[in-house]
Amino acid sequence: MLTARRRVVATAAVLAGSLLLVSCGGSDGGSADGRTLRLWHYEGPDSAMGAAWSEAVKEFEAEHPGVKVKFEEKGFEQIQKTAPMVLNSSDAPDIMEYNKGNATAGLLSRQGLLTDLTSEVTKRGWDKKLSAGVKTTSQYDTGGVMGSGKWYGIPNYAEYTMVFYNKALFKKYGVAEPKTFDDLTAAMDTFVAKGVTPLANAGAEYMAQQYLYQLALSKADRSWVDSYELYRGRTDFHDAAWTYGATTFADWVRKGYISKTSSGTKAEDAGVAFIQGKNPVLFSGSWWYGRFTAENKFDWGTVLWPGSDLTLGSGGNLWVVPRGARNKELAYDFIDITMSKKIQNLLGNKGGVPVAADPSAITDPRAKSLIADFNTVSGRDGLAFYPDWPVPGFYDVLVSETQKLITGSATPDACLDALQKAYDKGVPKK
């Protein structure tokens, strides 16, 4: 998400618990005896990543007799908000999942809170397993800007966004499955006329800002993305793309495509609403794929956002090793296992997007389709990263401004003004 995320499938239940970050191996926050690997991640157990990493834990312990993995489940928002403080203390884990991008992993690398993995990457050949587009979010320069410099994280999956739709509801209401952007808007008009809110949405978290960004991307190109994400040109939030995104998003709220009550909804709530058949369409990421496969009780399908060569996506969240980790060699060994063919193939067949799988080993038809669509996007250089990445704190600004568009408490122009101000304040000065 993140920032983020984009990706908070299991967050609600986790955040209900204490934010106390539990340490193991004594009051010093960890053991340096090489017998415990402290692992943090926020993937749900039913997700493709959760299932693959659970198997990786078993593999790791089998290959390291006498060593135990102490897994501590954290919520996405929990790690997002507390990481700088925790990583600068004795409570830092040995390895953890963290969001990629300038505002997250880039910021922590600049603050000196992450271990430089460059030598391990070369020694273990991880760089040979990652495509150029996926590598972008693994490397950060001295200013914390992605795309070059030292390696501070390793993704072992990729991700991208798509339109999930409930085929059963489309059939029930006599709506044609969307092939073009006009098909999508026509379908939403029909659902609204039938008293059904078409789009599942989460205004309190990442989902709403991703609708906004995707609408802007449909009027943008690669140079626009590079200017926004990599500072390779000036970003004007009142250009044609951003203006279209904000005005269309606000218009979709007025038309009833998006519920005004969704301003306070979290991503988990939106996902559950789709699973329960309350909303026929959800635009979000491949991180939902495994869960929908497991929990949807209806026929469903996916399409890439119609009418756009660009969509949100990148290499997946990163395995990072905190600077203060007590068992770094064990952490490197665990990363190596998650990059193995066995774990990569499992991830693919569970509905994830692996970065180093054997294509012939992916047997699930849905999984094959998921990976094929990713290859389509990646092949046309269509991964446009995420809207909250460019500057620290931008995630919260995007949440606030999209909420205003949902409630109607601010105009699109006013929201774009606020985004411009926050963005310009955060962009590194040359």
Image (cartoon, rainbow, N blue to C red):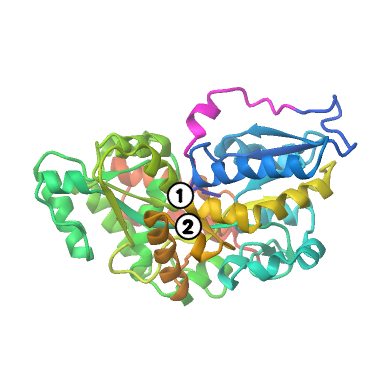
Chain-order first, disc 1 or disc 2: 2
Q: Quadrant of residue 229?
A: bottom right
Residue 15, percent from left and from top: 54, 28
Q: Quadrant of residue 341?
A: bottom right
Amino acid type indicated by mark 2: Pro
Dot 2 falls on a residue whose secondary structure is loop
- Tag on residue 398? 1
Judge by depth and name the residue closer to the eye, 405 or 95.
95
Judge by depth and name the residue closer to the eye, 107 or 285.
285
- Residue in view at x 50 percent, y 65 percent: 359
Amino acid type indicated by mark 1: Leu
Residue 50, percent from left and from top: 55, 42
Q: Main secondary structure of the magenta part?
A: loop
Q: Is residue 350 rendered to the left or right of residue 101? A: left
- Tag on residue 387? 2
The answer to whether residue 167 is magenta is no
Q: Are marks 1 and 2 in contact (CB under 8 Å)?
A: yes
- Residue in view at x 32 percent, y 39 percent: 296
Q: Is residue 148 rendered to the left or right of residue 101? A: right
Q: Is residue 253 rendered to the left or right of residue 95? A: left
